[in-house]
Amino acid sequence: MERNALLARFLAVRARSERLMSPLAEEDFRIQSMPDVSPPWWNLGHTSWFFAANVLRPNGAEFGDFPGFDYALNSYYEGLGPRLPRAMRGRVAQPSTDDVRRYRTAVDRATIALLRAADEATFVAMHDAVVIGLEHEEQHQELFLTEILHIRWSAPEALRRAYAAPLTRPPSTASSPMRAVDHRGGMQTLGHDGEGFCWDNELPPHPVLVPDFALADRLVTNAEWIAFVEDGGYRQPLLWLSNGWTAVQQSGWQAPLYWQRDGVGWRRFTLRGLVPVEPDAPVCHVSFYEADAFARWYGGQFATWKHARLPRECEWEHAARVSGFDQRGGNLLDEDPMAGALDAAPAGSREGVRQLAGDTWEWTLSHYEPYPGYRPFPGALMEYNGKFMDNQRVLRGGSFATPRGQARAQYRNFWPADTRFQATGVRLLLDRTGH
């Protein structure tokens, strides 16, 4: 990316983070609703610390003296020094939110000045670190939306407040029955093999033998999930993996996160407040364990979906390459966040496989592991992805909170199997080999 284009992108990404946080009251910035959720002040500061640590300091750029900020804002980079424990981020008063804003302004000014004034050799040397910093900040923009949803929901019901104003959508037409779209397998390429940015965990591209399969033409809907709930899906241990059943019992899961009974129906808390559960919209905020149990239940209900399961990531990516990954048309996060849905939306009536880009991240059966020949980013950034290839599942596709420019068919998201506060949903697959 040439200098002016990179500078323009820097300004745009940093401005979108500010717009996302503009609806917050000062008190919102300090709340941490659970250990996995960071308070907004920390996201605002950490995304600036990334540029300070990986762009400004390595190039000798001055941006002021901010004692304690490296300790407070480092996330998990052991090679860059000690850090505030994650669970403590909502229990400290310093640095103050105003101090974090001053820090962010200072980092912005220094980074802009460096981008403008660096000689060509310096610009080339720091280019990749700046791009990674911007991709990293966009990841945190999605994290912020899922975290502020959890923060607002965690308040007592009488004190809950929406993040954004209600959005009127035209009534959706009833979803058609889920249809299985056949895909021929064979030797296929898995991983990033084109132009543009990718994370180290998407490399290298490599051949993989994919079996024949049929993929659901849309995501599982709320109506289908309600049927699972009403049939006792959360009370039938034989549907669940052992660790999943333990999670159900210990955490008392009875429905997706943010759902609550409303008489004989259901309502759910969203970024736009408490709304009735929309039957034809994709189910959202379910764990891998719930997705896996639903697949087992659904396969026992419908003969055409007998032995349904979740896709492996190689199957999902192959389907996305064949069916088309509609980044432009998907329900993703745009430059004006408040104008978007900020929630998963019904699939619509287009033919073929839909909703691969956006709406909800889709759980896969695949454990998060390195591709053959994987090499992490050099230097401190080697800690970005590789160290987390343990006890996690891969998700694909993107969600309503994913910045549009980040969505791509090869992107590998990953979370522990019991994660529910992310915008996660379900797509089913049928094996065709041997049938």
Image (cartoon, rainbow, N blue to C red):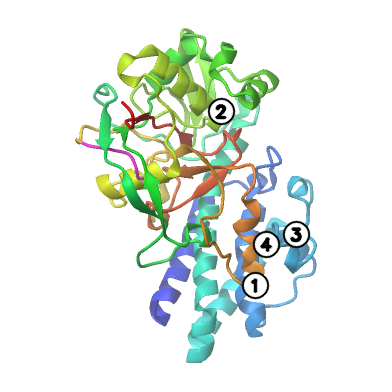
Q: Is residue 349 visible?
A: yes
Cα–Cα span, label 4 and label 2 = 38 Å
Frontmost residue, 268 versus 183: 183
How would you rate the neighbour count of disc 1 (Cα within 10 Å): few for under 14, some for 14-19, many for 20 or more?
Answer: few
Residue for badge 3: 72
Mark 1 or 4, nearer chain start: 4
Secondary structure type for disc 4 = helix
Instruction: Say which label, 2 or 1, has the lower sequence index.
Output: 2
Circle nearer the N terminus (3, 1): 3
Amino acid bearing label 3: Ala
**Residue occupied by mark 2:** 289
Residue type, label 4:
Val
Q: Which residues are magenta?
A: 352-358
Earlier in the chain: of badge 3 and badge 4, it is: 3
Main secondary structure type of the part rendered in magenta: loop
Residue 102 screen position, x and y as percent: 65, 67
Above or below, 19 against 399 in this view is below
Q: Amino acid at mark 1?
A: Gly
Distance of label 2 from label 1 (alpha carbons): 36 Å
Give the residue pinned by disc 4: 100
**Nearest the camera: 94 or 304?**
304
Quarter-wise, where is residue 43 in the image? bottom right
Q: Residues within 10 Å of mark 3 (few under 14, many from 20)?
A: many
Secondary element at tag 3: helix
Whole-Å distance between the Cαs marked 3 and 4? 10 Å
